[in-house]
Amino acid sequence: MNIDLIWETLPKLLSAVPATLALAFASIFLGFLLAVPIALVRLSENRFAFLASGYVYVMRSTPLLVQLFLIYYGSGQFRGFFEQIGLWGLFRDAWFCAILALVLNTAAYTSEIVRGGIQAVPHGQIEAARSVGMSGFRLFRRIIFPIAMRQALPAYGNEVMLMIKATSLASTITIVEVTSVAKQVISKTYSPVEVFLIAGAIYLAINFLISRALVLAEWRLNPHLGSDSSRRFASAPLTH
């Protein structure tokens, strides 16, 4: 084990952390905004609900790497079309393609988490809100959605952590994030063990901080659970 190489490589990999975080949090935020309407459509009796179900099925049943390649490399086959509608400038950009692929992927998983949370809302609380004249969007905003997110937070926390790790796939389409820098260093030093140990430790540290923040958020949202919140988060199943 080359300790000197580890200390020499650490600053280089840390310099790529902002790119990893920007990629992850942009995808998580936009994916959540897309996931909520998808979940609501799937729960509705809308005749187009099957489209949302099909989208979720396809995105959950195919590898994220394949989705990323289809968007980044596949869009080049339709350059003429994208130029006509003025979108080729976006699809030629690796960052846009990476974020689009991550957003579409996490939106499918998150929509299922949100849908499960909404279905878990006690019917009695909904009826109580209706009995005092609350309905429509106000009922959803003040009663259904807050309770649903409390129910869904442990599973959604796992999705957030999985998305942090999924950003490593962006290195395959020229984006310079932690994994990409690690590959560059390995190509010069031929020491994959030391370099990937550092990269893994960086992802581990990021996800540790996120897991603690999510446990704190769950405790704040469910103070009556006390120390049970951390156990519920730790035992929540992975969504990928």
Image (tube, rainbow, N blue to C red):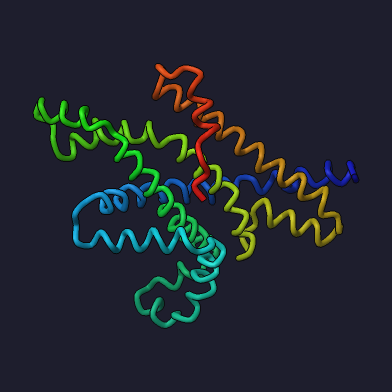
Question: Which of the pair 175/169 is nearer the observer?
Answer: 169
- Rendered location of residue 61, percent (x, y): 47, 62
Number of residue marks = 0
Q: Residue at x 19, y 61 (%)?
A: 47
Q: Residue at x 51, y 18 (%)?
A: 227
- Rendered location of residue 110, percent (x, y): 41, 47
Rendered-image quadrant of the N terminus: top right
Question: Which of the pair 121/163 is nearer the observer?
Answer: 121
Left or right: 123 with respect to 10? left
Left or right: 1 with respect to 115? right
- Rendered location of residue 11, percent (x, y): 75, 43
- Rendered location of residue 198, percent (x, y): 76, 44
Left or right: 6 with respect to 171? right
Q: Residue at x 49, y 47 (%)?
A: 239
Question: Which of the pair 127/28 is nearer the observer?
Answer: 127
Whether 78 is drawn above or below 93: the answer is below
Whether 153 is drawn above or below 62: the answer is above
